[in-house]
Every structure is written in C-alpha cells, then in structure tokens.
Image (cartoon, rainbow, N blue to C red):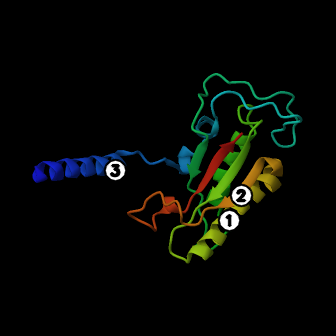
Amino acid sequence: MKHGKWRWWACGLAAVACAAVAQPREPVLQGAQVTEDALIDALAIDGPAPAVAGARRGFRPAVQAPKEQAGHAAGPGRASLLITFQTDSAVLLPESRNAVDVVARALQSDKLAGYSFRVEGHADPRGSTEHNLKLSQQRAAAVVEYLVSHHGILAERLTAQGKGSAELMDKEHPTAPENRRVTIVTQR
C-alpha cells in the first residue's frame, strides 16, 4: 500500500512538472517579427475599447471608440519586444528605435486608438534587485519618452513600469536576451 501511494504521488509530481514544461512561453517579437499588424493583433483585446470623451491616437482627435477592423482578431492584450540597450544603460539603440517606431504606428491605429498602455521594462538578474528595478524603470520610461516626443503619442495613454528581474522569461538561462525585454500591455 505504501508503494501505491508513493507511485501515485510521484506520477502526480511528474504530471505537474510536465505541465509546467509544456506551457508555451510568451513569444518575444524581434527584428522582422515586429510589424504593425503583429502588434495590433497582440495588443487588441476583446470587444471595442470603452468610449472615452476626447479619446485621441496621439495628436489627432478620434470621435468614437475604435471599430473592429477586418483582418485583426482580438489578442491577449500584451506584446513582448526585444528592445535592446547597452549594458547598464537606458539609452535606446538605433535598431530599438526602429522597433519603437513600429510600436508607435500600431498605437496610432484605429484598432488601438482608444486604449492606454503600460510599458513594462524587464532586466536580467546580473545586478542587485534594487539596481535592476531602477534600470528596468528607466528603460520603460525611455520607451515612453520616445513614443511621446518622436511620435506624438499622448503621455496620458502610457505608463512606464519597471519589473526588474522578477519576471524572467527564460529562467534556465538568466542572462538570455529575452529576459531584457520591454512588454507592452493594453489597459482598459
């Protein structure tokens, strides 16, 4: 009887471990994967955005909440991007600016015009917890500042939040590039 209970417990533990391994990771868009359509599909959420008095894409007024566009299904409301920075820096690199330019076009689309977004910065665990939290906040703020100053996205639509190294995407490889990412999250 003892062996039966042990075997049941071990099988249950193995099933939990397999389920944890089998869960797909959120994809990190990088390079040519960062397209306006991919971002709109990822950031769109079920149903139209709530009507907001005076809602605007950036500097252009929108009279109503955005209408569903053909060809764009509702997505999970989040997109992780490989936005690169120099080590221990919050200055956007040229290739990162190109990706953020695509983000700006997506945020100004009719599909996403009525939403606000949280820009989450993530870091790998090479520094102290406090340092990584501060650095990830600065990186998220750099993306927000670029969207506002270079593309006219309303600052009220964007919130920067540093996550530090608390939400590693690749825990087996802590210094993997996908752990140093920016995630855009749609807010209602």
Residue located beneath label 2 in the image: 160
> Residue 7, how many percent across, how many down?
16, 50
Disc 2 + disc 1, Cβ < 8 Å: yes
Query: Residue 162 sits in which quadrant?
Result: bottom right
* Three-letter residue code for mark 1: Gln
Of the image marks 2 and 1, the number of the one nearer the N terminus: 1
Give, as a three-letter code, the residue at label 2: Ala
Height in image: 171 above or below 153?
below
Estimate the spatial distance between the alpha carbons at disc 2 and disc 1, rounded to whole Å: 7 Å
Categorize mark 3 by other alpha carbons within 10 Å: few (<14), some (14-19), many (20+). few
Q: Look at the numbered disc 3 and give the secondary structure of its residue.
A: helix
As rendered, which of 121 and 96 lies closer to the eye?
121
Label 3 to label 2: alpha-carbon separation: 31 Å
In the rendered image, which quarter is residue 106 located in? top right
Label 2: few (<14), some (14–19) or many (≥20) C-alpha neighbours in 10 Å: many
Please state the horizontal and vertical placement of residue 41, each as a whole percent of the image: 60, 35
In the picture provided, is 97 more to the left or to the right than 171? right
Q: Which residue is mark 1?
A: 137
Query: Label 3 belongs to which residue?
Result: 21
- Mark 3 or mark 1: name the one nearer the start of the chain: 3
Residue occupying image coordinates x 63% and y 30% = 46
The answer to whether residue 67 is above or below residue 157 is above
Q: Residue 78, image x and y in percent?
A: 60, 44
Pick whichever of labels 3 and 2 is earlier in the sequence: 3
